[in-house]
Each structure stands twice: as structure tokens, then as C-alpha cells.
Amino acid sequence: MLTSRAGSASHRNLKCQMISSDELKKQAALAALEQVEDGMKLGLGSGSTANHFIRGLGARVRGGLSVVGVPSSERTAELARAEGVPLATLEELPHLDLTIDGADELDSRLRLIKGGGGALLREKIVAAASSRMIVIADGSKLVETLGAFPLPIEVNHFGIGATTAAIADTARRLDMPASLTRRLAADGSPFVTDGGHAIIDASFGLIRDPEALSLALAAIPGVVEHGLFIGLASAAVIARPEGISWLVA
Ligand code: 5RP
């Protein structure tokens, strides 16, 4: 437990307020790191929470731990290399023991929205190749119903207008609102994923039936992958100012 040892409730509250979300992400990452064992083949997620995990993993590797990681993005590969974590590809290692990754949202049934960093396609491939996936997150990511975070949808550039219209039609059929925005990079140019695709950020409102939406989106030609991860996560470590908790499937 991470609860303060300070005596008064007001002192405890003050300390809770002072823990940043980045510090909570780090606490979740380090708690998940305890699940890593010598000899494991690991899927390495992407994003600021996953980066904390990779830095912690690097420290353990420098201390003698023997693992190999498959990165889910070019940025993750770069950080893992800098940390001295040995890397491989899914061609070399098609089956992984454990993937550790962040999420943009998760619910109590371990259904996730991912792709805020634009790495959802490789993240999903790596997670699906793993026996277990542990999600690491600060408490703000755990929601009752998915959907406040716009769902990232990775699409092929060819026919992007038709694909966008088909996503809007799908939402109408499922009786959901849809506000669809093409993601831009920091310099204002269209965002391009590691796989060379575009991302459409889709605000559907609250997603009451993630399974139905997932199947419907996956059936649209031009949709390469979407950020609903269903049935992939086996556990989640949630860090809140009051302490760490685990959600298990
Ligand atoms: C990247 C992701 C990330 O896991 C997600 O965006 C969470 O990011 P962060 O850990 O920075 O909050 O899906 O594609």
C-alpha cells in the first residue's frame, strides 16, 4: 500500500493531492515490473506509462535480468535500446510471455481504449501474441463506461473519405453519435503511424456495447485496426494516491 503514514486525515489528503499523474503512472509501471521473471519474452507498450516500465526494466537488465522485448512502436524501440533492453521482432519470437502497456481508458471488465499515442496497430498485434497482457494506468483511466476518450481508428490513406463515411454510417446503424476528426501531428500535418497509415479520432459518446462496435468497425474495408482492445488484457495495475490496486480478468 502507498498510503501516507502521516497521522491526520488533512495531512494525508494534502499528500494525495501532491502526487502527480505521472508519478502515479510510474508507480503502476514499477508494480507491474515485479511480474517480470528471468528469461521472459516481453511485449513492450508505448506511451508515457509504458516508458516508465521500460526505464525500470532497463535498470533491472543492467542489474543482470535476462529478458528480450518486442517493441510496439519505433519510439519504444529507441527508448528500450537506450536502456540496454535486448530487442527482437515477432518474426523471431512469434509468442510472447507478457505484454505490459498503458491505456487511454479501461473499464472494470478490462476492455480498453488505446491508441492515444498512435501505436494501436502494433500494440494490438504484440498484445495478441502474448500469453498475458497487464495494463498499467493511473486511476483517472479507469471509467465506468468507455467513450469519453475519442476512439482512435487507424485507416489506410487510400479511400479515406469513403472509409470515414462508412464509419459514420456504422455509428448511425448502432444508434451512436459520431464526430470524426483526422488526427494531425504537432506541426499541423496529417499524423502518420509507424505503419504508414492515418488515424481518425472518433467520438461516439459513451460506448454501451464495445463488442458490437469493435466487430462493426473491423468489418469496414479501409479500417486497418481500431483502438478497442477486448479480451486481450488479463490484469490491470491501477495507481491512485491512496495506493495500488489490481483488476484481474
Ligand atoms: C499509445 C497508447 C498509450 O498506451 C495510451 O495512449 C496511454 O498513454 P499514456 O501512458 O501516455 O497515458 O495506447 O498508442
Image (cartoon, rainbow, N blue to C red):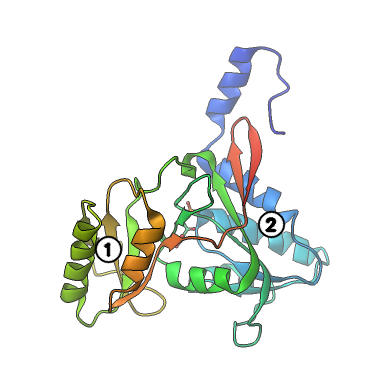
Q: CA distance from mark 2 to mark 1?
A: 31 Å
Q: Nearer the viewer, residue 161 or 107?
A: 107
Which residue corresponds to the image point at 30% horizontal and 61% vertical from the top-left? 186
Please tell me whether residue 103 is drawn above or below residue 84 in the rendered image: above
Q: Nearer the viewer, residue 156 or 195?
A: 156
Residue 207 coordinates in the image, percent (x, y): 34, 50
Counting other residues with Cα less than 10 Å from the Cα at mark 2, is it few (<14), some (14-19), or many (20 or more)?
some
Please tell me whether residue 218 is drawn above or below residue 229 in the rendered image: below
- Residue type highlighted by circle 2: Gly
| Left or right: 109, with 192 as reference point | right
Q: Nearer the viewer, mark 2 or mark 1?
A: 1
Residue 78 coordinates in the image, percent (x, y): 55, 72
| Left or right: 54, with 176 as reference point | right
On residue 56, the disc is 2
Q: Nearer the viewer, residue 128 or 249?
A: 249
Residue 131 coordinates in the image, percent (x, y): 66, 68
- Residue type highlighted by circle 1: Arg
Corner quadrant of residue 101: bottom right
Disc 1: which residue? 183
Corner quadrant of residue 43: bottom right
- Secondary element under disc 1, as helix, strand or loop, is loop
